[in-house]
Image: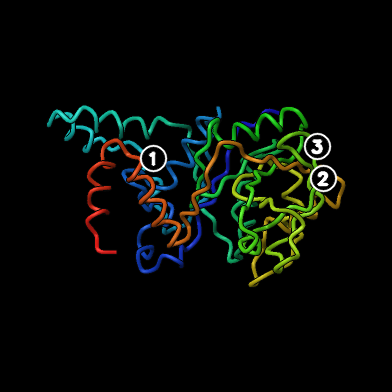
Amino acid sequence: MEISKVIIPAAGWGTRFLPQTKALPKEMLPVLDKPVIQYVVEEAVASGIKDIVIITGWHKRAIEDHFDRSFELEKHLEKNGKKKELAQIKKIANLANFIYIRQKTELYGNAIPVLAAKTIVGKEHFAVIWGDEFIIANPPRLFQMLQVYKKYKSAVISAVRIESKDNLSKYGIADMEPLDKNIFRIKKIVEKPAAGKAPSCFATHGAYILPPEIFRFISKLKKGRAGEIWLTDAINELIKSGFPVYGCEIKNGKYYDTGNKMEYLKTVVEFALSSPEFSKDFKKYLRGLKL
């Protein structure tokens, strides 16, 4: 029942960032000096998981290259005495045990890359974290979820409290019953509810701990919104079957939606303002702008 694998879907086209993502995966967009997907991997590793399964496509080779060794670059850095940079790139390749699966189906939707991992997951419970967004939390989001999993031995979804009612229609919102402090049992997920119709203020979003039974429900799904196969629909079917699914409100965390242009820009600015290296000069630059 131990969680040993994290699935990171990273096979999408990144159409919201075109033309930038025509050749560069959206998961590789930089937040200061690291790509978005590295923050995701580091969260999993900091939570105690070492097997990282990344679902890619033919146009996502840059992700595999990023987490691989680069011997020529290492020799170049060593030759030029760049010890700090050398240590950084060596560390990336040694973060985890990376496993790559190419998504080859013509079907679309965020449940499809999860289904692609069926063979390698087998009969284990596993985690899923999206590759184009992340949460910075202390302790890490996935670590908090694993504590809930250890207690209930069932499916767990990260829950983010949405402060603005106007934003509830952007997410899948939990219809739930409270259990203990930041834990609740999910009765169903209402996807992007209409204004005033949200069953709670909790978005079930970003990270999941799922049982192998989820593959059976994904396989049976018909195309839903926009003609795609949605993970939320499979989770609702899992709940209907009697399988308990719990929500874990993430404490001491902040969500960064780096799959969205405006939120991506906000993320880069916020990280620059909090960076010991850039903060002072960047604040000075911003104060000098005629806004």
Which residue position holds label 1? 67
Q: CA distance from mark 1 to mark 2?
A: 41 Å
Q: Is residue 3 left or right of residue 14?
A: right
Residue 116 vs 4, above or below: the answer is below
- Looking at the image, which is closer to me, 36 or 177? 177
What residue is shown at x 77% (from left), y 43% (from top)? 245
What residue is shown at x 22% (from left), y 56% (from top)? 288
Q: Is residue 222 left or right of residue 226?
A: right
Q: Is residue 152 left or right of residue 14?
A: right
Nearer the observer: mark 1 or 2; the answer is: 2
Residue 255 vs 150, above or below: the answer is below
Circle number at residue 179: 3
Q: Quadrant of the N terminus?
A: top right
Q: Residue 270 appears at what percent x and percent y?
A: 39, 48
Is the C-beta separation of discs 1 and 3 under 8 Å?
no
Q: Residue 234 appears at what percent x and percent y?
A: 74, 55
Circle number at residue 162: none
Q: How is the image coloured?
A: rainbow
Work out whether residue 140 can be spotted: yes
Label 3 sits on a secondary structure element that is strand
Whichever of labels 1 and 2 marks the residue nearer the N terminus, that label is: 1
Q: CA distance from mark 1 to mark 3?
A: 40 Å
Label 1 sits on a secondary structure element that is loop
Identity, as a three-letter code, of the amino acid under mark 3: Leu
- Looking at the image, which is closer to me, 154 or 200? 200
